[in-house]
Amino acid sequence: MKYQHILGMASAKTRKGESLGYLTGICYLSPAKLSLVINVCPWAGNCRKICLNWAGRGAMNSVQKARRNKTVLYKENRGLFMENARLDILALERKAKREGMTPCVRPNGTSDIRFHHLVVPSTGKTLMQEFPHIQFYDYTKDFVKMGEYLMGKLPNNYHLTFSYDGDDTNWLDCQGILAHGGNVAVVFRKTIPTEWRGYKVIDGDHHDLRFLDPQGPVIVGLKAKGRAKKDQSGFVVDL
């Protein structure tokens, strides 16, 4: 079985979590239709053009190639992809134990896949089922998945935060999520307010560990980074 790393453990997002005692593994794929073989962000909207896929080390050709290779593997050999993800989580556990940290996993770094439905062939279980002691978390624009999460239909160790996209339909979805106690991530251009549209706003840039956020309804404020600083689509909010 050819082994290909699925999870990465070193990024600006994970370092903040390490200061809090968490070691995070994140899966970065080629977002939306960038891989040309599969759309791993079927609910993406205004975020497509300013995706953090190109932020930091993502601007390097070698990193983009690695992400595309993983995406191609996901499309062409889903079973092998999941087996490799499982091996990466086992490695993450070992590393976290050596360093006295708590492991956690963000399956969708630059994608929006329903990982809680994907089974590892050798175990017959999803990653969340096989590793119930590990916290998984994601941002999502998948309204159905978010609804299942709020109704308690997702694994107990999988935390979701809904994402604001800037259009009226998405905001209606956000209001529904907030009304049922969910949290919504919103990107602000320069400063993160303490309140927005009548909802409390917390600073989500202190760390990426969204499962540590207070229970909603709460807006998780994120400051625009990279290409998002020049966004005029509505995705980035001007106060």
Image (cartoon, rainbow, N blue to C red):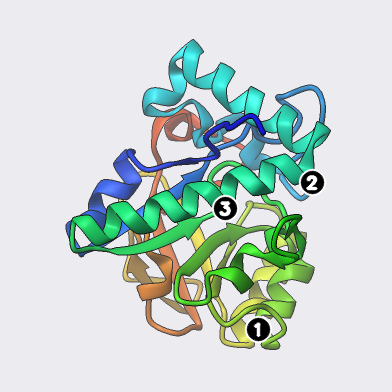
Marks 2 and 3, how far apart in space? 24 Å
Of residues 149 and 92, the one nearer the viewer is 92
How far from the left and from the top, in percent, is residue 187?
Answer: 46, 51
Look at mark 3 in the image and give the residue it sits on.
Answer: 86
Q: Is residue 236 above or below residue 35?
A: below
Q: Is residue 29 above or below residue 207?
A: above
> Mark 2 — residue?
42
Residue 206 visible somewhere in the drawing: no
Depth check: 16 or 21 in front? 21
Q: Earlier in the sequence, mark 2 or mark 3?
A: 2
The residue at the point 37 percent across, 59 percent down is 93
Look at discs 2 and 3 and give the one toward the viewer.
3
Residue type pointed to by label 3: Arg
Q: In the orientation shown, which residue stands out farthest toward the top?
A: 61
- Mark toward the start of the polypeptide (2 vs 1): 2
* Image height of 27 relative to 120, above or below: above
Read off the residue under disc 1.
Answer: 150
